[in-house]
Image (cartoon, rainbow, N blue to C red):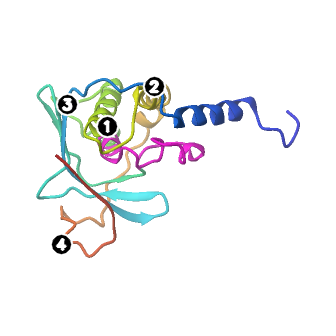
């Protein structure tokens, strides 16, 4: 390809971003689970954050008798390519609680900490992400439609295996136990209460 000319892939991705930015695609399917609690994120450095469990109201996802309550971990939010960050619904924090749940399931798997009945497959972890996004949209906490949700789910289904099989990253040592935003002297990037 001649220098200075954008690739067909880049042009296709840009067109996709513009298309998704329009309000098309219908509503996502109804959620199947329940999501409640507080999302508390601490900034560490550029594109590096710590999810801090709120001891008084922890982020919790429940579905079909299974309950996910993430512990302290490093996160980058959603692994969305920077090219798409300006497209509505595609920033790394558009669906912060859903991404935190997904990151937690990945960490548990990679570190060998997932034991029955809390063992999830990659497909099940991706289903949790999709359902949590549906909950945030249904509750009016985030923008979304069936196309946005489908693209995110499709991306993690297609490209998530390498991250799923990646190395275990130790949890943060700077977080000594759980805390609440009210007691913290830290800069809080986001506190979202889900009811």
Say whether marks 1 and 2 touch (CB < 8 Å): no
Mark nearer the N terminus (3 vs 1): 3
Mark 2 or 4, which is nearer the eye? 2
* Cα separation between marks 2 and 4: 42 Å
Residue 173 shown in magenta? no
Figure check: 181 above or below 119: below
- Classify mark 4: helix, strand or loop: loop
Mark nearer the N terminus (1 vs 4): 1
* Quarter where residue 124 is shown: top left
Query: From the image, which quarter does the N terminus lie in?
Result: top right
Seen at 40% across and 26% down, the residue is 146
The x and y percentages for residue 133 are 33, 36
- Classify mark 1: helix, strand or loop: helix
Mark 1 or 4, which is nearer the eye? 1
Mark nearer the N terminus (2 vs 4): 2
Mark 2 or 3, which is nearer the eye? 2
Seen at 34% across and 30% down, the residue is 130
- Classify mark 3: helix, strand or loop: loop
* Cα separation between marks 3 and 4: 30 Å
**Residue marked by disc 2:** 25
**Residue marked by disc 3:** 33
Magenta residues (range): 77-104
**Residue marked by disc 4:** 183
Figure check: 46 above or below 36: below
Mark nearer the N terminus (3 vs 4): 3
* Quarter where residue 95 is shown: top left
Label 2 neighbour load within 10 Å: few <14, some 14-19, many 20+: some
The x and y percentages for residue 172 are 32, 59
Seen at 26% across and 25% down, the residue is 30
């Amino acid at each position: 390809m001649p220098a200075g000319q954008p690739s067909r892939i880049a042009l296709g991705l840009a067109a996709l971003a513009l298309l998704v930015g329009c309000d098309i695609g219908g509503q996502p399917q109804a959620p199947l689970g329940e999501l409640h609690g507080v999302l508390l994120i601490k900034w560490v450095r550029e594109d590096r954050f710590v999810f801090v469990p709120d001891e008084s109201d922890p982020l919790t996802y429940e579905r079909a008798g299974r309950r996910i309550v993430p512990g302290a971990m490093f996160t980058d939010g959603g692994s969305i390519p920077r090219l798409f960050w300006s497209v509505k619904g595609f920033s790394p924090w558009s669906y912060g609680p859903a991404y935190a749940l997904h990151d937690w399931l990945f960490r548990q798997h990679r570190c060998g900490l997932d034991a029955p009945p809390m063992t999830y497959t990659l497909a099940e972890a991706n289903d949790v992400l999709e359902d949590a996004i549906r909950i945030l949209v249904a509750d009016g906490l985030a923008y979304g439609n069936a196309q946005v949700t489908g693209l995110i789910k499709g991306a993690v289904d297609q490209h998530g295996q390498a991250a799923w099989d990646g190395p275990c990253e130790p949890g943060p040592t700077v977080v000594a136990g759980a805390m609440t935003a009210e007691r913290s002297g830290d800069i809080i990037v986001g506190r979202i209460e889900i009811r």
